[in-house]
Amino acid sequence: MTRHKTELANYRFERALETSDEAELAYQHDKMNLAENRIYYAMFYMVQALSILSDFSTSKHTTLKGWFNKEFIFTRIIETKYYKIYNRAFDKRQEGDYDDFITFDKEEVKEDIETMKEFLENIGTSLEKEWTPERNQFQIFT
């Protein structure tokens, strides 16, 4: 793996963790739409890190979701529930960003933050290893 690829994946990983913190801060300041936005983007950055390590690149959110589903969920490398979590966060972000008169319930956002943390932990554990399509498995990388 090239140094640049590793650095970029690590950068996206760090962005995911930073954005997770932003989601919690938004929640603490009663900014529920912003919290839902940051919840989604934390997951998005984590999946981007995974895509970088797999030599996949796209600027489209739906294409990245489809790639994640095909390469990691469909193949059962990552549990199906994590795609559902990611997809639900995407839908909420879309709704909060583009629909009118949307307000998210504070308790629901709190649950979404906990779900986001589970997602990040699970995918983050996968990032500690490099997936190699030839062997359809992860292998430690540095």
Image (cartoon, rainbow, N blue to C red):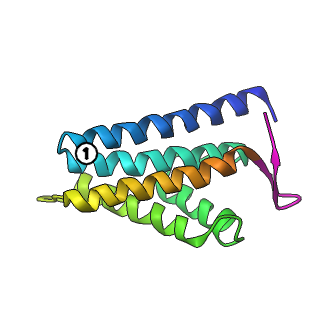
Residue 54 in the magenta stretch? The answer is no
86 versus 36 height, above or below: below
Q: Is residue 60 above or below residue 23?
A: below
Query: What residue is shown at x 42% (from left), y 46% (from top)?
Result: 41
Number of labelled discs?
1
106 is higher (above) or lower (below) than 29: below
**Image location of residue 124, percent across then percent down:** 61, 47
Q: Secondary structure at mark 1?
A: helix
74 over 5 or under it: above or below: below
Residue 53 position, x and y percent, is 71, 44
Q: Could you say where residue 86 lies in the image, as x and y percent from the top left?
A: 47, 61
Q: Residue at x 30, y 55 (%)?
A: 110
Q: On the rendered image, what quadrant is the C terminus found in?
A: top right
Tell me the magenta residue range: 130-142
Residue 139 colored in magenta in the image: yes
| Residue found at the far right of this picture | 135
Q: Residue 71: which quarter of the image?
A: bottom right
**Residue shown at the point (56%, 50%) measured from the top left:** 121
Q: Nearer the viewer, residue 133 or 62?
A: 133
Q: List x then y, in percent, for residue 65.
A: 53, 60
Position of 37 with respect to 60 (left or right) is: left
Q: Which residue is mark 1?
A: 27
Q: Measuring 49% from the left and 49% from the top, which residue is drawn there?
A: 44
Left of 67 or right of it: where is 20? left
Q: Amino acid at mark 1?
A: Tyr
Q: Nearer the viewer, residue 27 or 40?
A: 27
68 left or right of 23 in image: right
Quadrant placement of the N terminus: top right
Local crowd size for mark 1, using a 10 Å CA cut-off: few (<14), some (14–19), many (≥20): many
